[in-house]
Image: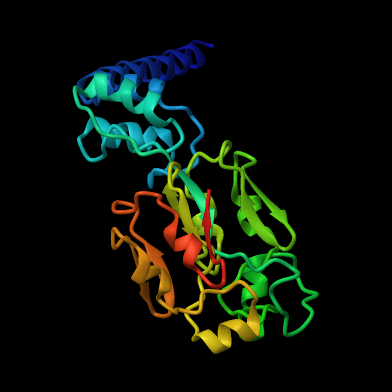
Amino acid sequence: MTGALLAAALVGGVGLLIGILLGVAGEKFKVQEDPREVAIREALPGNNCGGCGYAGCDALAKAIAAGEAKSNACPVGGAATAAAIGEIMGTSDEVVHRVAFVRCGGTCDRAKERYQYHGVTSCVDAAGTTGGGPKACAYGCLGYGSCVAACQFDAMHLADGIAMVDREKCTACGKCVSACPKGLIELIPYEAKTQVRCSSKDKGKDVMAACEVGCIGCKICEKNCPEKAITVENNLAHIDYDKCTGCGICAEKCPKKVIIFR
């Protein structure tokens, strides 16, 4: 019995000693947490969507506190969050309200198909089939909702064969941009008045054979823009939103009505 008690006491003593040593080591080598990082984390919305380019809100808070990211890096939080973080960091970074925009107008009645697709209802899978999908336009929206599935804010939906964006729900997190295998979705200023609803880089004749509302690269919009804000490159019109004043002349002159004006 005495031997058992001695063994128990020895084991207990060793355990106690190890516990004390671990406690001392923990205090000695403890990494001090930046109080700004804690405050920034509390100011962030907590969606952990990754739209900022970091692996969640914790990673972004750490990056901002370390000066590796700006106070306006969270697209979901918007101006209010940026202002709160700016106050913590003593900085002021401008926030541009952005929304996603799908650069395709090829609805079911306007875009032609080369064949019927009966595979997995995923844009990624459909894009891997012959010709990049069933649509005659290799650049067009496939309409199987990969972007819809990726959106955490119910801001994407399918309508008449193409993806559409609910501008009031969109937080510009960028998930849909990454999910689209065709690269059709971009983030544009919320206040933008004009958008080019096409992504085809084919020549005019081929575009018209595939879709009724494709950009034919005629450059009429480019020639009529008073601010030189729209240019045609690779047979496709592009808008420089830093120059665009939203006059709507390009939309008015576009013979294919590819440029929309809101």
Quadrant of residue 125 within the rendered picture: bottom right
Quadrant of residue 121 within the rendered picture: bottom right
Residue 10 spot, x, y in % from top left: 40, 17
The front one of 93 and 43 is 93
Q: Is residue 34 visible?
A: no
In this rendering, is residue 187 above or below 95? below
Residue 235 spot, x, y in % from top left: 43, 80
Residue 42 spot, x, y in % from top left: 40, 20
Left or right placement of residue 133 versus residue 252 in this view:
right
| View extreme (bottom): residue | 205
In this rendering, is residue 259 above or below 19? below
The front one of 54 and 237 is 237
Residue occupying the point 56% across, 66% down: 257
Residue occupying the point 41% across, 68% down: 221
How many callouts does the rendering have? Answer: 0
Residue occupying the point 39% across, 19% down: 15
The quadrant the N terminus occupies is top right
Residue 116 spot, x, y in % from top left: 79, 79
Q: Can residue 151 be seen in this view?
A: yes
The front one of 197 and 116 is 197
Left or right placement of residue 125 versus residue 59 in this view:
right
